Amino acid sequence: MLKTLIIPYRGLSREVWFLALTTLVNRAGAMVIPFLSLYLTRYLGLTMSQVGWIMTCYGLGSVLGVFLGGKFSDRFGYYKVMLVSLSLTGLIFLALQVVETFYGFCIGIFTLTLVADTFRPAIWVALDDYSDSGNRTRSVTLIRLAINLGFSLGPAMGGLIITYISYKGLFWVDGITCLIAAIIIGRTLHQKSAVITREENRKRNPLSPYKDKQYMVFWFAMFLVGFTFMQYFSTIPLYYNQVLGLSEDHIGLMLAGNGFLIFLLEMPIVHSLENGRLEDLKIVIGGTFLLMLSFLVLNISPWISIAILGLALMTFGEMLGFPFSNSYALDRSRKGNQGAYMAMYSMSFSFAHILGPNAGLQISERYGFESTWYLMGGICLLACVILFFIQRRRASE
């Protein structure tokens, strides 16, 4: 049994493991974000409307940060971008604890996410450099496992820090963990392939992702997937509470089950599919179809067993869809513009983060949860159709 669990992790490079460790430390340290709305309302006394505008600044900073991260990764190399991003993010976290005004926090949170999210496309470009075609999807999966594990540990530790220290302690821990992650990168990693100069890149003339029509259609499909997926972190918890009558601790346990299944099963599943006969886009279509079913089954009946089934369908859809869609984006890119391609991929989820939760909540309030689940299922079906036509076009090429 143990040997079966270990086999999928074999063959990954040393750099990928250190990259995963850096990601784990960084994401586990992201404790402020889950408690941000509570901090702003309870500690600083801001209104819900003001918090809404601050979260908008959070999303806008994320979009711009991802865009610049892709540009900088192609121009200066992923190593410098990761190192500078983590170092500056740590310092901004430490400085943010002294900001106590609405406008100051709007500027501060925008600056924080702008700097922090330049890291996101850089890490995927680094992953492509540290892996090969035979283990790229498994390498992506290892980073996803580190992200999921970090996000699971972060809120738990953050709650303890708030209880036994203070909200201010979150900023200290977040800042220090970012600086520790930067030290890990500085001591263990390096830029493996040479950075392509602007002159060399001009001669190579790689296709811009904005001119790659097939990729832009793929981007739209992933935005639709992200738009629906975000409901599991905004509208779904309210459904669990208001319709199923679940308390916060039970909701937390259910969502924790998602992270546990991913940690336990995603790598073996990806390992079994990575070198199989199925193309990556076909697997993404399958994952999106499961995500669609996860919403539609909720309309069968308001039972806890149905909700658990929906969550399980979403989890397996996530395990199939996200690693292989990321791998497709990497394969579609070329040396010299990988950062731009991966920035576009990350931006699909950034835009989904801005629009998805608010739209889901507004629709649920006006028309009810049942209408919301049918709509989200329909959006997933549209994404499946779009991905199917991309796959057919790719096969014909």
Image: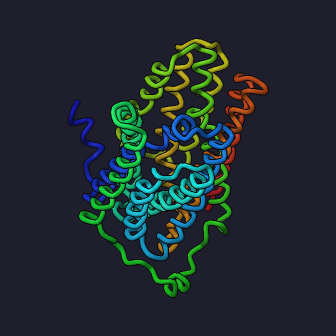
Q: Give the quarter of the image for residue 185.
A: bottom left
Residue drawn at (57%, 13%) of the image: 245
Which residue is farthest left?
A: 3
Q: Quadrant of the N terminus?
A: top left
Residue 48 locus on image (x, y percent): 65, 37
Q: Is residue 366 above or below residue 390?
A: above
Residue 116 locus on image (x, y percent): 47, 58
Q: Give the quarter of the image for residue 268.
A: top left
Could you tell me how many numbered marks the image carries? 0
Residue 226 locus on image (x, y percent): 60, 43
Residue drawn at (61%, 34%) of the image: 231
Residue drawn at (58%, 60%) of the image: 344
Q: Nearer the viewer, residue 272 or 376?
A: 376
In this rendering, position of residue 376 left or right of residue 331: right
In this rendering, position of residue 224 left or right of residue 120: right
| Res 273 visible | no
Which residue is farthest right?
A: 366
| Res 164 visible | yes
In this rendering, position of residue 383 left or right of residue 325: right
Q: Is residue 227 above or below residue 215?
A: above
Q: Quadrant of the C terminus?
A: bottom right
Q: How is the image coloured?
A: rainbow
